[in-house]
């Protein structure tokens, strides 16, 4: 089964309850902007050419930034992949996570390490050496999934719809899990520890890969996991051992090396390295997870925020009723919810992509790719006609009714048919969202992402058979004209989440620092648009700025 649709990447556009307006010279909408209907005024429309170029990224920040009021409870999204994009070629994504203790300091079994040290020294028979020993260790990373139906029998797996897994999901692939020995600090020493330490997609993991915790073939399982660990109560007619004791949503589950966690965790009970999170994160610094798919055709976006390592263990305990030492069971978790980031590896892009990247504003196509791929830079002031309009608009106090920046997708290009639902336009120079995003009258609709920020736009529109993306930049243009704002370059990218307004650090191939929406770093696919230097037959699809404005009649 191949999953091509995603509620993380693609949510059904809901039309009911949302009023859509169309705009033309005589029938147009205000959308909260200036509008004048008067015999003394004319409403006019002009279309201007703009310049656009490709920016090829070398790296992008991939660690998640929590605790921001603008996140709307965003779920961190990381991926594992070994995938070949039809346009850009092969790339891989591996994942590194810091671990945190379930609680500090941990007590394994019933007795602390200090109590066990006194075993046999007193008269209390319950103070014994519990001899904790690891039985199994599991790494769990859930998929994005939802229960799709209910069952009458509670002892059967419930059906799930699994999301955000793409490509060849049937063929087994190799998974490698290793200890990662580089210390993942929270603060940047180069800023005198005043700024958060950033982690980028070009991190060289190889020198820090240590003990192999798992290496082998793995086949994806999209069923709910159910377990029957209950003991039968002999005093009842029901056989409790036949009842489900625990259940887990579909996930990647790997059995790790038990001896490693025996020596590094359970045998360290009472040691300073387990006394608090900071000492522990310096002691066991993290794990690395990577995959190799035989056909380079698998990409998985995972719910890593709910990932963990579960250590199951047995221990000896004294039963006061029987006055005997018995075996008990327990478990302890190491959680992922600290410092996480992706590493992206990309093979050189095909020649046609590189030609467009090096062509600057002369590029006939704009190549947008997620991860550490490519974005576009848009210069609205490239044409003298546009500059003249802005100057005349200021002088004559024209009123801007609507401004639209329109990009057309090249849907005839092989491999460019799976178009993203939405793109993201932002202030490239100041590393922030546009005023049109911030002041959008609809804003976020958390239950239906594609019904969010409707005035700002950026949604795929292919109703007329010509797929395009239209952004309203009305407030942005008005600020340039009326408030003397700088006509900055704009950035255009793919995005995995329209709610994610973070703009993060990145570096281009020349080593220059640039800004990229964080949603682009998590987006697994690409799209190709028409650029500014298209052929004569494609002039209608050239990137353009459309202005509708009001001026006094002369």
Image (cartoon, rainbow, N blue to C red):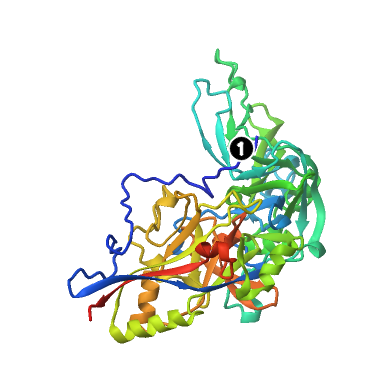
Instruction: Indicate whether 424 appears above or below 485.
Output: above
Q: What residue occupies the far left of the structure in this picture?
A: 39
Q: Quadrant of the N terminus?
A: top right
Q: Residue at x 44, y 80 (%)?
A: 385
Q: Quadrant of the C terminus?
A: bottom left
Q: Position of residue 150 (x, y in %)?
A: 49, 27
Instruction: Indicate whether 54 appears above or below 256.
Output: below
In the rendered image, which residue does mark 1 sit on?
250
Could you tell me how many numbered marks the image carries? 1
Q: What residue occupies the far front of the structure in this picture?
A: 536
Left or right of 309, for residue 439: left
Q: Is residue 53 visible?
A: yes
| Figure quadrant of residue 248 | top right
Q: Is residue 57 visible?
A: no
| Figure quadrant of residue 193 | bottom right
Left or right of 201, for residue 259: right
Q: Position of residue 471 (x, y in %)?
A: 44, 63
* Nearer to me, 546 or 522: 546
Q: Position of residue 525 (x, y in %)?
A: 62, 54
Secondary structure of the residue carrying numbered label 1: loop
Tell me if mark 1 has few (under 14), some (14-19) or many (20+) residues whose alpha carbon lies within 10 angstroms of its own.
many
* Nearer to me, 229 or 93: 93
Q: What residue occupies the far top of the structure in this picture?
A: 237
Q: Position of residue 349 (x, y in %)?
A: 73, 62
* Nearer to me, 232 or 443: 443
Q: Residue at x 51, y 56 (%)?
A: 497
């Amino acid at each position: 089964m191949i999953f091509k649709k995603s509620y993380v990447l693609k949510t059904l556009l809901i039309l009911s309850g949302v009023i859509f307006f169309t705009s033309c010279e005589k029938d147009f909408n205000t959308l909260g902007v200036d509008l004048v209907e008067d015999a003394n005024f004319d409403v006019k429309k002009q279309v201007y050419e703009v310049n656009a170029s490709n920016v090829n990224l070398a790296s992008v920040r991939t660690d998640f930034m929590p605790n921001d009021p603008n996140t709307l409870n965003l779920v961190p999204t990381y991926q594992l992949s070994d995938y070949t994009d039809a346009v850009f070629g092969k790339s891989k994504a591996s994942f590194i996570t810091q671990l945190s203790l379930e609680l500090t300091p941990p007590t394994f079994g019933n007795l602390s390490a200090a109590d066990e040290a006194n075993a046999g020294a007193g008269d209390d028979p319950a103070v014994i050496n519990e001899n904790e020993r690891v039985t199994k260790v599991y790494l769990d990373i859930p998929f994005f999934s939802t229960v799709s139906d209910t069952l009458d029998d509670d002892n059967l797996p419930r059906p799930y719809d699994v999301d955000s897994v793409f490509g060849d999901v049937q063929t087994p692939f190799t998974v490698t899990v290793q200890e990662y020995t580089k210390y993942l600090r929270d603060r940047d020493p180069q800023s005198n520890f005043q700024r958060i330490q950033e982690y980028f997609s070009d991190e060289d993991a190889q020198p820090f890969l240590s003990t192999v915790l798992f290496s082998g073939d793995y086949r994806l399982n999209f069923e709910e996991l159910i377990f029957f660990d209950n003991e039968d109560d002999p005093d009842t007619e029901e056989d409790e051992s036949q009842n489900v004791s625990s259940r887990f949503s579909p996930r990647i589950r790997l059995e790790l090396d038990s001896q490693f966690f025996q020596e590094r965790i359970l045998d360290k009970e009472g040691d300073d390295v387990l006394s608090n999170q900071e000492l522990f994160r310096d002691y066991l610094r993290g794990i690395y997870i990577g995959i190799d798919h035989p056909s380079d055709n698998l990409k998985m976006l995972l719910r890593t925020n709910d990932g963990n390592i579960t250590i199951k263990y047995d221990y000896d305990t004294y039963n006061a009723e029987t006055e005997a030492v018995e075996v008990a069971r327990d478990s302890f978790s190491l959680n992922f919810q600290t410092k996480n980031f992706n590493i992206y590896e990309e093979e050189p892009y095909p020649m046609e992509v590189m030609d467009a990247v090096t062509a600057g504003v002369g590029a006939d196509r704009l190549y947008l790719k997620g991860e550490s791929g490519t974005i576009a830079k848009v210069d609205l002031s490239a044409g003298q006609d546009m500059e003249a309009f802005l100057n005349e608009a200021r002088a004559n106090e024209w009123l801007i009714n609507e401004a639209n920046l329109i990009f057309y997708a090249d849907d005839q290009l092989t491999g460019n048919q799976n178009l993203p639902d939405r793109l993201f336009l932002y202030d490239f120079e100041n590393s922030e969202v546009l005023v049109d995003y911030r002041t959008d009258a609809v804003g976020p609709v958390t239950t239906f992402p594609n019904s969010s920020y409707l005035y700002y736009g950026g949604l795929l529109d292919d109703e007329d058979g010509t797929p395009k993306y239209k952004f309203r930049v009305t407030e942005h243009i008005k600020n340039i004209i009326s408030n003397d704002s700088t006509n900055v370059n704009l950035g255009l990218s793919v995005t995995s989440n329209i709610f994610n307004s973070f703009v993060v650090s990145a570096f281009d191939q020349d080593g220059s620092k640039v800004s990229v929406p964080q949603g682009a770093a998590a987006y697994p696919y690409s799209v190709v648009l028409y650029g500014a230097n298209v052929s004569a037959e494609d002039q209608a699809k050239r990137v353009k700025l459309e202005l509708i404005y009001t001026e006094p009649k002369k």
